[in-house]
Image: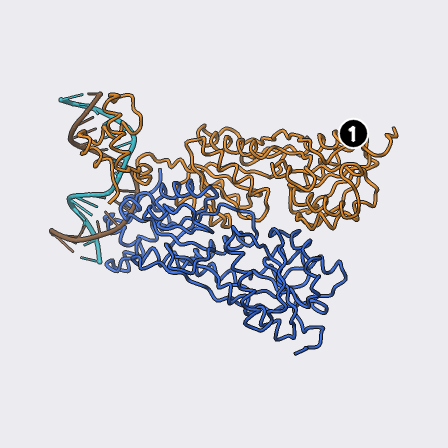
Chain colours: A blue, B orange, C cyan, D brown
Amino acid sequence: MTVTIKDIAKLAGVSYSTVSKALNNSPLVKEETRRKILDVACEMGYEPNLAAKQLVRKKTDVIGLMWPTIERIVLATLVTNISKAFEKTPYSMILSVDAQETAVDTFRKFQVDGMIVFGESKHMHLYDYTIPFVVYGVSESTQPLYPIIDANHEASMYKAVEHLHQLGHRQITYIGQYDKSDALQIEKVDGYVKAMKKLHLADYIHIVDSNGLNWFDGYSAIDRALESKPTAMIGGSYDLSGGMIRALQEKGFSIPHDISLISYDNIPQMANMEVPMTCIGVPVHLLAEEIVQAIIHQIESPTEEPTVKKLTPTLTIRESTGPSPEPSDS
Amino acid sequence: MTVTIKDIAKLAGVSYSTVSKALNNSPLVKEETRRKILDVACEMGYEPNLAAKQLVRKKTDVIGLMWPTIERIVLATLVTNISKAFEKTPYSMILSVDAQETAVDTFRKFQVDGMIVFGESKHMHLYDYTIPFVVYGVSESTQPLYPIIDANHEASMYKAVEHLHQLGHRQITYIGQYDKSDALQIEKVDGYVKAMKKLHLADYIHIVDSNGLNWFDGYSAIDRALESKPTAMIGGSYDLSGGMIRALQEKGFSIPHDISLISYDNIPQMANMEVPMTCIGVPVHLLAEEIVQAIIHQIESPTEEPTVKKLTPTLTIRESTGPSPEPSDS
DNA sequence: TTGTAGGCGTTATCAC
DNA sequence: GTGATAACGCCTACAA
């Protein structure tokens, strides 16, 4: 039989409501009694019954994360970080890898206090469910229907291009996926174009569509990228950049001596690549932190207008970037 | 306010205990009343309160899956399949990506009925927790401490080698990770060695340590693999084999004309590789099914002796295997 | 500062 | 067939 607060009460010689108070750190209980009760509870191996608690509190302190596409390593890292971030809060997190509809049903059953949604929230009726949620990784500049949290892609690319510019680079090529259906990728490309223009490098704009986001997509995009004889490249994602490095090395380019490289995505793994990679993006632990804060805020304060929160990216300089091999021309 | 069975009772003009019965398909309620109650319930958007139910039933119908390393794509596929397999059962599944200790705590909080553990169950005190669990992907030939479910690696390799042997291959190289800490990988290698010996191919044994399980590990292992001039190769995992194909193609080998390839892991994605891949392993949907059955069995029938269940692998023949280019010598 | 009692939404056991 | 009613384990006024 599992031990309940009544058992503790009996053994501690108090009423069970006192036990309840003590266990919840209520200030209305004498320090001495509290200690004793805590001791007894611990000794008996007491474990509060979530179901009972939930029944009366109408709150689970659990947040559900919907994660339908579990293949991308950057997302996996983000999930891990979010999970870690929750450890510092009173909330726990559970995951669903099901399709959005199924996931929502599960989460409703569990009566999670809130949800985190990755990517496009196609089924707008999420919103009908009255359960608070935030969306990550969707680009929406107009007044959104729900709270969105995302990286500032324009700022990302501006910082990346600016860094290369300062190192004397002009011919900067972008390699990434240009898939109409993926708003996030489009935003990156757009950010690059805007940044190049703003820094008066419009003539050097060169975009290579990698037709995918995997290692090999980056690897095989290099030939096309080299056509414009760039002194620097920006890779649209972690995996992509990994393939790019490899292809460049195989072709005899030395990084950063011959070509500088910056990758999008700011995750610790960037430091362990063939060449430790200079990267741009919101550091994943910060991103996680922000997402966690956002959903908690959403839960705890009555809904204001949904807003888009654009996170400021950080440039993390490592060994893949260096001065341009070509003399600065202008 | 959420709608409860009392609300339904009022609107349907019956007592709420009748509603409860109707909702649980009790035979003790007239068909007519049942229909009416169900209608009302549906109309009001009734959603049963899991917490309340659990409080009295002492059962959650929920199973927790511990998944600490979320990076490997094959595991991701397995998780998805397990999730799908649960849909056919009365159970639901929740996921935790936390470290084992944290995950167990979460699951205890939820009072899950059972747990699925991936890989080494380091913290043996799982067993203390009285909550049933099964472990997948751990090799233990002696009497185990807990129920284990795993693929039969010896049989896998035997079938793979046998298939190649029948096609006339002799020089069959294995590429995989040979990391002492990963019992699963070791088993594969051992399986290969045993199979080669059993088929009198001991002289042709050639094992290449890929030093990892990623795409690029396979890609870069090819040079070493070619040293023994094999006519066939076996890749230790999906990602590995992907890299192997690429490297071979780049070197001008035609698959399967010059070299045959079999990959470990039997997932549908094998069909979509550069060359549709012949593969060996327990088909992932079957594996999922078995794991689900195992944990449910573990929950519903009082613990017998824990056993190891070795699943029979299937050889799925696609285009990456063909007859040996060399004349059969013996 | 501590104890009493009512209720959270269900299920299950009895009477009717 | 159907309807009271007592649990389930906990929280929270309110009373002592």
> In screen coordinates, is B243 left or right of D6?
right
> In screen coordinates, is A148 left or right of A177?
left
Label 1 environment density (alpha carbons within 10 Å; few <14, some 14–19, many ≥20): some
Q: Position of residue C16 (x, y in %)?
A: 13, 22
Determine the secondary structure under disc 1.
Answer: loop
Q: Position of residue B154 (x, y in %)?
A: 69, 32
When asked about the image quadrant of residue B208, the answer is: top right
Amino acid carrying mark 1 in the image:
Leu
Marks counted in the figure total: 1
Q: Looking at this view, is A128 or B137 the one in front? A: A128
Q: Looking at this view, is A178 or B156 the one in front? A: A178
When asked about the image quadrant of residue B157, the answer is: top right
Q: Quadrant of the N terminus of chain A?
A: top left
> In screen coordinates, is A26 left or right of B168?
left
Residue A46 visible in the snapshot: no
Q: Chain of mark 1?
A: B
Residue B47 visible in the snapshot: yes
Residue at the extreme front of the image, as rendered: A203
Q: Position of residue A26 (x, y in %)?
A: 27, 57
Q: Position of residue A65 (x, y in %)?
A: 44, 49
When asked about the image quadrant of residue B271, the answer is: top right
Seen in the picture, residue A141 relative to B250 is either above or below; the reply is below
Identify residue for label 1. Answer: B167
Seen in the picture, residue A67 relative to A155 is either above or below; the reply is above
Residue at point 55% right, 54% down? A74
Q: Looking at this view, is A46 or A132 the one in front? A: A132
Q: Quadrant of the C terminus of chain A?
A: bottom right
Residue at point 19% right, 33% down? B11
